[in-house]
Image: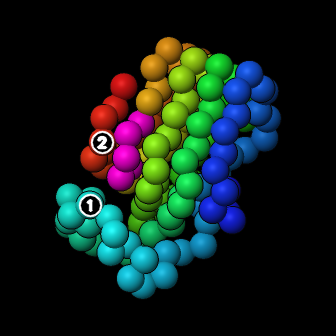
């Protein structure tokens, strides 16, 4: 994911921790292509430590056994492309707090066995 490659998983078991705080900080000017509503939301919150997920993530009909989260205390993680988690079971916490989604988020038919957080997140596209 750090290299900007697309992630397409289907019918798999994912173990371990998926943490978005490992992405390098966004370089100046790299957020110019964001929709104006996302830029305004980030500016209003005075977000400075910004991490960018540059490719789509799709996890379909799978089981995520480890935690999946942003782990950001200040700043935000920006998802530039769709995030799809359809039909996936999350056995541990999903915490995508402090995220900005510049495209759609699809959690249809997902099962959350623990908490799922989207605290202080911004959505531009469809959410289902």
**Residue located at (79% from left, 35% from top):** 15
Residue 84: x and y, percent? 52, 34
Position of 45 compared to 23: left or right? left
Name the residue that disc number 2 marks: 125
Residue 112 falls inside the magenta stretch:
no
- Residue 101 visible to an observer of this rendering: yes
Residue 12: x and y, percent? 77, 26
Tell me if residue 116 comes above or below residue 82 in the rendering. above
Residue 64 lies in what quarter of the image? top right
In the image, 10 versus 74, the foreground residue is 10
User: What label sits on residue 35 in the rendered view?
Assistant: 1
* Earlier-in-chain disc, 2 versus 1: 1
**Residue located at (69% from left, 23% from top):** 62
Report the residue that reaches farthest toward the bottom. 28
Magenta stretch, main secondary structure class: loop
Position of 75 compared to 57: left or right? left
Disc 1, SS: loop
């Amino acid at each position: 994911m750090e290299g900007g490659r697309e992630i397409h998983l289907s019918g798999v078991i994912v173990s371990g921790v998926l943490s978005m705080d490992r992405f390098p900080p966004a370089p100046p000017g790299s957020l110019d292509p964001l929709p104006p509503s996302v830029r305004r939301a980030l500016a209003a919150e005075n977000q400075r430590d910004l991490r960018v997920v540059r490719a789509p993530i799709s996890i379909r009909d799978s089981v995520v056994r480890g935690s999946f989260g942003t782990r950001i205390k200040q700043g935000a993680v920006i998802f530039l492309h769709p995030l799809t988690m359809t039909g996936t079971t999350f056995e541990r916490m999903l915490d995508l707090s402090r995220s900005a989604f510049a495209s759609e988020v699809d959690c249809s038919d997902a099962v959350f066995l623990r908490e799922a957080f989207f605290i202080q997140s911004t959505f531009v596209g469809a959410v289902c």
